[in-house]
Amino acid sequence: MSPERRAAILLTLLGAALVALPWLAGSYVLSVATLILFFAYTGQAWNVMMGFAGQLSLGHSLYVGLGAYAAAGLFFHYGIGPWAGVWLAIAACVAAGAVIGFLAFRFGISGVYFALLTIAFAEFTRIGFDHIQWLGGPGGLFIKVEQREAWDLLDLRGTPRMFYYVMLALTTGAFALCAWLLRSRAGYYWQAIRENEEAAQALGINTFRWKMLAVVISAAMTAVSGVFFAFYYNNLFPEQIFHISRSIEIILGPIIGGLGTLFGPILGAAVLTILADGITELMALAGLEIPGVKQVFYGLCLLVVVMFLPHGIWPTIARRLGLTRR
Amino acid sequence: MTPDLIANVVIAGLLTGLVYGLMALGLSVIFGVVRVVNFAHGEMMTIAMYAAVILFAALGFDPLLAVVPVAAAFFGFGYALQSALINPFITRPEHSQFMLLVAVALIMVNALLMIFGPDARSVQVDYQLESYAIGPILIDKARLLAAGMAVATSAALFAFFRLSLVGKAIRACADNHLGAQVVGLNVKRLYALTFGVGSACVAVAGCMMILLVDVTPVLGPAYTLLAFVIVIVGGLGSMPGALLGGVLIGVSEALAGLLIVPSAKSMFSFALLILVLLFRPQGLLGKRT
Amino acid sequence: MNNNGSNPLSSSRRRVVQAAGAAVALSTLGFPAIVRAQATRLKVGVLLPRSGFQGFIGQSCQKGADLAPSVIKEMLGVDVELMNADTETNIDVARTRAERLIQEGANVLVGPFDSGAAAAIAQVAEQRGVPFVINIAAAPQITEQGYKYVFRNFQTAIDIVRNGLVLIGDLFQATNTVPRTAVYMHVNDTFGQAMTKGIGALLPRQTQLPFKVVDTISYDPAAKDLTVEVSKAKASNADFLLLVCRLQDSIILRREMVKQRWNPMGVISPGSPGMYEEQFFKTLGKLSEYCVSNVPWYDPNAPLTKVVEKAFLKQNPKDKLVFHGLNVGFTFEAILIAADAFRRAKSTDPKVLAEAIRQTDIKSKMTLGAPIKFNAKGQVEGIGSACVQNLNLLPAVVLPAGAATAKPVFPMPGYKA
């Protein structure tokens, strides 16, 4: 059986399992699964910028926050639903991404400096939003929670099951989009830029344009996850949503799972969330209640993966499952 | 907004800035030479602060005295960390380095939490709350001492890098990695040495910082960020640059707090960082590579 | 070349892996709790931040939870089983932990100290129809959502401010002082902002208060250096400092005040944590004296308080209840409310429990104020505050006179007019 056929079968099985999950699992697992999908989707969006185009963004929480506040603000003040609000969210994030990208690439900032630039923008925005009273300031923006029984897709008010399926649809869409992007002209140019930017320029590729495209697509995708976040949690605090720890949470999945791959972010998000929960359960079973033990374990796992599996978990597994030509 | 108020605030900002500069000095040395993005920098300083607390509680060491053993210990620790963990990562892509040190930082923070608990610890030296009065100006004694130590340490470091053979060798590595190897310098050992020296600086900064700030396990990340901002603003690999960057940040934050809303004063450092990255990425005193 | 697809061993291995994966997945899915209704025990899910940024507060609240089962057994003859979960000061974790507790059979949820976590858990509770009794969370919006399963036995920020301001007036009357100006400093976070809004709305209406706020200074909760802020406050020449703070910054502020030689008439908090907490005393020693906090508190003279204090000392022999007053008091009462409802409802069915909680009327309670009765929004009205002053390195209730254990001291010694 060819690797592609194998991949298609496994993917279909996985898809079917995910669709059937709400009927098989309790609501606790559902909430964890929704969280995994959220990080899988956002990680995938970040992956476009980093894994595809090689630009390390450590301030991605900026886009999540902007997207969330844009849609939530419209809903809170004007009653405009998320399907309209998402466009403002995307516009805001595209603008922010474009500004950052322009400033960085025009002035030749790359690598660690680019990363620090993204952190600076995220922190700047976090403190800034703490002072915007119209959006709730540090007290937070609370969207009125209604309609908990029926599915109101128009206003994204509904059961956890509905949110799960929305997130599943988004993640599937992102997966498809990224698959398509990788095979398109953009994908090839990005690979060239990632491997050796100077050589790519020498070949006549307009690296500025393609890097900007990566940044903008990544920002736009992340905006949507921000909108989801706003309507799922129904409250936003600048301290939490723009925080650097959120940015780090977002990038853990793709890096552990496998940068630049399609399935890496999804696998990474799943492994990390299950690992975190698993450790909590283990601690509870062992009767250990020392705060901090869990995080130490978590850090050790990260360390091991980074040291011994630099390309992430997925490439190794893919090879074992016979999904790659080698 | 009297001149007294402004003067007091600016002087306090200046002194605080010097201590920030001391903290950033270690990072400048490490980043400037080894080019490793040490995202565990703040956590290392936190550990140094805890060391000072323990030495004070157990042996009654004033932090000014504790500097010596803590710096020595950190030199060894930095040397070991570089040789064992970080050396293999120098050729790896940046995000790998970053992840490695994030993992290390995470382990450090939570190990501290496990050992010391979440409560804040401090040293209670007698002069901690004293201040000198020069006319209407009040100068915080502890801050003055810490700033003095910062200047002294920078001077010592400067002398080391300018005048000693080892220091010159390290600078050679930083300037031209390949050339240094060609000339026969043991680059790996020099890198480890540099990391050790940088870590010793961080240790001194920690001992000084505990005079001003109470230590909690989660203190690290904010200071890591601040150190990076200062190093970039001041200029990579430039020691006076680190001090200058620190002073600039200290004073500008103080003035921003005075003239605008104090809760927004950190926005200033980030705005400064963005501006410097755009218009003078090598920093104020850095060399254009 | 070896074509993997034709190797029978690898394809069967793959199937085994898949089957194993499916088995693992199914076993972790968990099936919803079947045993319900007529049970002899009430399972209370306790959600508190025991690690992370608010770890020390969560641990303090946990002491109130830990002593509850034995005290409640004696008082009401009801068996309470605690299911403890750590929210890790993270709303994602709060949400999933709440789901987990419900799945494991918690009949009622209690917690979580933080407003963000409270909002997240409230949604889960409402969604799953499991009653949720909030011990401490001040954001007013939580009980404005029209929830049927969420109850709060704590003051909202507006109530805290109102009671706090009234107590300030009482303090001035009791000490015969008339300060004319105050400088208002507040931490710029969720709580600080809610308090500031409350003060902005209520202070102008409290015409019996003799003072005006001459300057407002907001500061970053994460700031380690508050030199500028204190310089500004000192330069305002106000009579006293009105302060909304948290523990860490309150310590930094007090120290900075000494360094800058600023001795106002006093430091008064209209209702924030910090100055009555144990760390404040341990770190500042004598400097902690005379600071005033007007906060919801327990009644030192109430009979229930004495019972709880005995149980507290048994479990924490080296500790003092007075350092954990607020945290222990309200956490204990939250579980008490749940147990009392269980006793009346005689069932662990969540709907029945929720109804029973709605009918709560507890007159013998530990905290100050009116009996515990929920209004239509699930909020208890009339919870009282006390004026707590730091005297002899302990927080002491100085007002209202009925609950006082000491007399208030204002202005602070060291104040020069």
Image: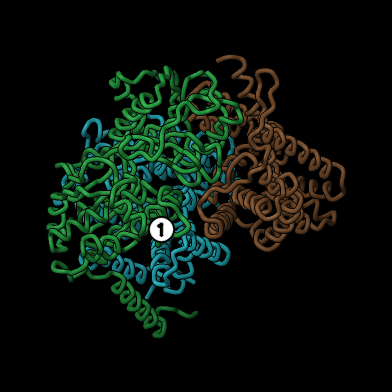
Position of residue A2 measured from the top left corner of the image (x, y, whole percent): 39, 73
The answer to whether residue B3 is left or right of residue B187 is: left
Question: As rendered, which of A217 and B217 lies closer to the eye?
Answer: B217
Q: Colour of chain B?
A: brown
Tell me the crowding category of disc 1: few under 14, some 14 to 19, or many 20 or more residues within 10 angstroms, Cα based. some
Position of residue C164 measured from the top left corner of the image (x, y, whole percent): 34, 32
Q: Is residue B274 visible to us here? A: no
Question: As rendered, which of C355 and B11 lies closer to the eye?
Answer: C355
Q: Write down the chain letter for disc 1.
A: C
Tell which chain the image draws in green. C
Q: Is residue B129 above or below residue C135?
A: above
Q: Is residue C283 above or below residue A159?
A: above
The answer to whether residue B252 is left or right of residue A41 is: right
Identify the residue at the far top of this view: B2
**Mark 1, residue position:** C313
| Tag 1 secondary structure | helix
Position of residue C62 measured from the top left corner of the image (x, y, whole percent): 37, 56
Q: Colour of chain A?
A: cyan
Q: Is residue A326 above or below residue C403?
A: below
Question: As rendered, which of C68 and A322 lies closer to the eye?
Answer: C68
Q: Is residue B179 visible to us here? A: yes
Question: Mark 1 belongs to which amino acid?
Answer: Leu
